[in-house]
Amino acid sequence: MSKPQFETLLYDVEDGIATITLNRPDRLNAFTPKMMLDMIAAFDATDADDAVKAVIVTGAGRGFCAGADLGAGGGTFDQGAREAERRAAGDTGDVTRDGGGRVSLRIFESLKPVIAAVNGAAVGVGVTMQLPMDIRLASTDAKFGFVFARRGIALEACSSWFLPRLVGPPTALEWCYSGRVFSAQEAHAKGLVQALHAPEDLLPAARALATEFVANAAPMSMAVTRQLIWRGMVADHPMEAHRADSRSMRQRGASDDAREGIAAFLEKRPADFPDRVSKGLPDLWPEWQAPEYR
């Protein structure tokens, strides 16, 4: 598969790990409609490529992402005043979709584990785009901020769904009401970030974690597990999880992956899992339908 090229991102695959680097360092990787499209396309690429078994997202230069690019001044968030740009980003008719939300929903649907390596400032959409990623590691120098109320707007990128599930409503509301920028140490203490690393150790730590996934886990099992966890968070009753788990155990238990995983364990050797995510996941939720935007 040819390597995708993007205007606002760097994209590299090595040893089963795709690294997506936000690449507007002169603007602290500020988010634009083009970056939105590039991010969606990058996750389309990682899902389609069986050579990719885990994904790392980081930023070039000093920042992870400084939020929306405010170069348009006071009209930055006025979709009506930016009609041509809005339509170029995929909006049709009178329907206006939040660009950060489109990225978050695409990451939510990822078939591969996603690790955020937060190397610097992450505010606005720079932090909300991380919320549907599975694991967040941060540099000790990183800073975070849900600054929307200080800009006269409110939450975006589906963060009103993700954030309170990650850190609880009181912390989510305090961060969002105040709009203050807070340290990586506070983000770690409140559960937004799983681990802190010295700046020079951040990417090696993210790669080490991704390598553990790549070396030991069946890609199809990771894809199924990711859906079991995320979809389970909106289930009305544990019975829904039991149904999906039971279908998974029946289908995955009869798979070539399961035979290989057990044989490798008994023979005390690394497993070489044959199933490919690109061939399609088992249907564990026959009643599941992703809601349409309308």
Image: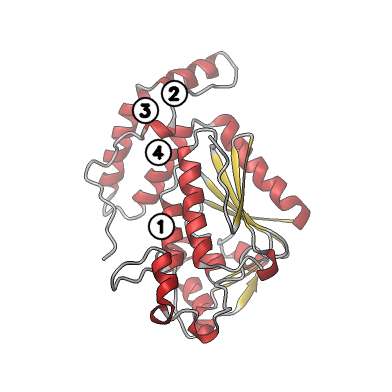
Q: What residue type is labelled 2?
A: Asp
The residue to which callout 3 is attached is 252
Question: Can the viewer see residue 68 in this picture?
Answer: yes
Spot the residue most to the left: 287
Q: Which amino acid does label 1 sit on?
A: Leu
Q: Distance between the residues labelled 4 and 1?
A: 17 Å
**Label located before the other in sequence (2 or 3):** 3
Report the disc number at residue 257: 2
Q: What residue type is labelled 3?
A: Arg
Q: Give the image location of residue 224, x and y in percent.
A: 40, 38
In the rendered structure, are the residues bearing label 1 and label 2 in contact, judged by CB atoms less than 8 Å apart? no
Q: Is mark 4 on a helix, strand or loop?
A: helix
Rate crowding at label 2 as few (under 14), some (14 to 19) or many (20 or more) other CA atoms within 10 Å.
many
Q: How far apart are marks 4 and 3 (CA)?
A: 9 Å
Q: Is residue 204 left or right of residue 282?
A: right
**Count the marks: how many?**
4
The residue shown at (55%, 84%) is 73
In the rendered structure, are the residues bearing label 2 and label 3 in contact, judged by CB atoms less than 8 Å apart? yes
Q: Nearer the viewer, residue 281 or 48?
A: 48
